[in-house]
């Protein structure tokens, strides 16, 4: 790994840039040579680790946004109830 990159991705503001689906689909791994066949296990593990990190982040974001959505809906219902009570004579 070189400075400024991590798992073949670039760092933005100290954070790894999010994977794009095409990066996963089109990923090519180095073929191991010197009498061995297959892919470089370390390279595959690093890439899978990066995919797992992105998935964990996305799952966390979905949960956080679902909670925020529920909070906003409750606040809107409360506001609507309070507003309708004020408008009724």
Image: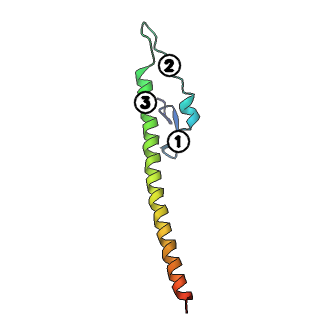
Q: Looking at the image, which residue sits at the far front? A: 89
Rendered location of residue 64, percent (x, y): 44, 56
In the rendered image, the vertical position of residue 64 relative to residue 49, given as above or below: below
> Label 1: how many residues lie within 10 Å, few (<14), some (14-19) or many (20+)?
some
> Label 2: how many residues lie within 10 Å, few (<14), some (14-19) or many (20+)?
few
Q: CA distance from mark 2 to mark 3?
A: 13 Å
Name the quarter where the C terminus is drawn: bottom right
Rendered location of residue 68, percent (x, y): 47, 62
Give the mark nearer the N terminus: 3 vs 1: 1
Residue 40 picture quarter: top left
Q: CA distance from mark 3 to mark 1?
A: 15 Å
**Which residue is label 3 attached to?**
46
In the rendered image, the vertical position of residue 46 relative to residue 79, given as above or below: above
**Which residue is label 2 attached to?**
30
Disc 1 is placed on an element classified as: loop
User: Residue at 51% of width from left, 86% of height from top?
Assistant: 85
Rendered location of residue 25, percent (x, y): 55, 30
Residue 65 is marked as: none
Give the mark nearer the N terminus: 2 vs 3: 2
User: Residue at 54% of width from left, 23% of height from top?
Assistant: 28
Disc 2 is placed on an element classified as: loop
Give the mark nearer the N terminus: 1 vs 2: 1
Q: CA distance from mark 1 to mark 2?
A: 22 Å
Rendered location of residue 34, percent (x, y): 44, 8
**Which residue is label 1 attached to?**
18
The front one of 60 and 83 is 83
The front one of 24 and 74 is 74
């Amino acid at each position: 790994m070189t400075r400024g990159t991590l798992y073949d991705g670039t760092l933005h503001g100290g954070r790894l840039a999010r994977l794009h689906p095409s990066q996963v689909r089109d990923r090519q791994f180095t073929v191991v040579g010197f009498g061995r066949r297959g892919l470089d296990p370390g390279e595959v593990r690093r890439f899978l680790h990066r995919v797992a990190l992105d998935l964990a982040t996305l799952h966390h974001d979905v949960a956080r946004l679902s909670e925020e959505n529920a909070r906003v809906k409750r606040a809107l219902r409360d506001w609507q109830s309070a507003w309708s009570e004020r408008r009724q004579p």
